Image (cartoon, grey):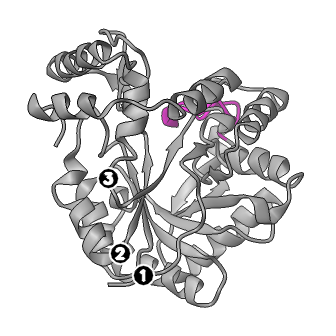
Amino acid sequence: MHERPAPAFGPLGYGAANVGNLYRALTDEEAHEILAAAWDEGIRYFDTAPHYGLGLSERRLGAFLATKPREQYVLSTKVGRLLRPNPDGAGELDLAHDFAVPADLKRVWDLSAAGIERSLEESLERLGLDRVDVLYLHDPELHDLDQALAEALPALAALRRRGVVEAVGVGSMATESLLRSAESGDADLLMVAGRFTLAEQPAAVDVLPACERGGVGVVNASVFNSGLLSRATPDVSSRYEYSEVPPELLARVRRIADICGRHGVQLPTAALHFALRHPVVRTLVVGSSKPEQIRQNAARLRENPPEALWEELASEGLIP
């Protein structure tokens, strides 16, 4: 078991995929307004990745953070995919990956130790900053989980030992990837995306107990399950994992919403608070495409749902 000091995150962080034009194009001014709203609400943890908008998220976030005192925020980015020229993408948009940006670059997997260092160097260049605090391996199971654990994650740990970054880990939606990373001995943090939410908790079976045993912290992301939990009354138009919501899951979440309503708590408020309830969770990372969404999420976290809500949800078998 290792006990390394974790960065001082605060309860709510901002996931910067949206300022990389996730789903829809934003102007630089609109992206700045979103990031300024996060800062004004006291958010001091910002997460990005080369994947988000083929580097656009890193460039916009770096330009914003360059105006802030470096010691006042925590910044993470991700490695595993390098960005390389894509002549075949001329005149196209990166809509296959849901980003409304020109597809003049392509993602190229590189989980080698040299590729990890190159990815960090290129991210720092896009960010215009001299360091990040946390470095995650991004979705390694989509390429080669065995190589990720044997080569890439030890390379990240070596960067931490050299003092290049403060903490390292893996970000994923796959419980096998998260579990094996937690048990590797190299990870300080896991970014658990959509696997410990009010709607479903597969990470609670093995991943979170492994984190407890190993002293690994959890950054809980996608806590609204891509939108399913973001409205007080979910319906068939709600998004789940970037797609349509399965009928049985929608019925389950509607039951949860009804119970929340009886306790005077809106579903999104309960979703945010539930996602922080496990002791290994250090912070939440929530994306937003509008400043008012950030202000609303921050306000929801200032509420105080009654303990009776969690007791009834547990008695109904809807949460552990």
Residue 282 placed where, x, y %?
46, 58
Report how far apart the C-alphas of labels 2 and 1 lie in the structure: 6 Å
12 left or right of 141? right
Identify the mark nearer the N-term, 2 or 1: 1
Identify the mark nearer the N-term, 1 or 3: 1
85 left or right of 10? right
Q: Secondary structure at mark 2?
A: loop
Tell me where residue 199 sits by quadrant: top left
Instruction: Look at label 1 and name its amino acid.
Output: Glu
Q: Which mark is residue 27?
A: none
- The residue under label 1 is 3
Quick one: 258 or 68, which is closer to the camera?
258
Residue 284 placed where, x, y %?
49, 46
In the image, residue 273 above or below residue 169: above
Residue 174 placed where, x, y %?
29, 53
Q: Is residue 85 magenta?
A: no
Mark 2 and mark 1 in contact? Answer it, CB < 8 Å: yes
Q: Secondary structure at mark 1?
A: loop
Q: Give me the residue at 44% from left, 73% from top.
A: 188
- The residue under label 2 is 215
Quick one: 4 or 29, which is closer to the camera?
4
- Tell me if residue 278 can be seen: yes
- The residue under label 3 is 278
Range of residues picked out in magenta: 90-103
Report how far apart the C-alphas of labels 1 and 3 lie in the structure: 18 Å
Q: Secondary structure at mark 3?
A: loop
Across the whole image, how many numbered discs are drawn on residues?
A: 3
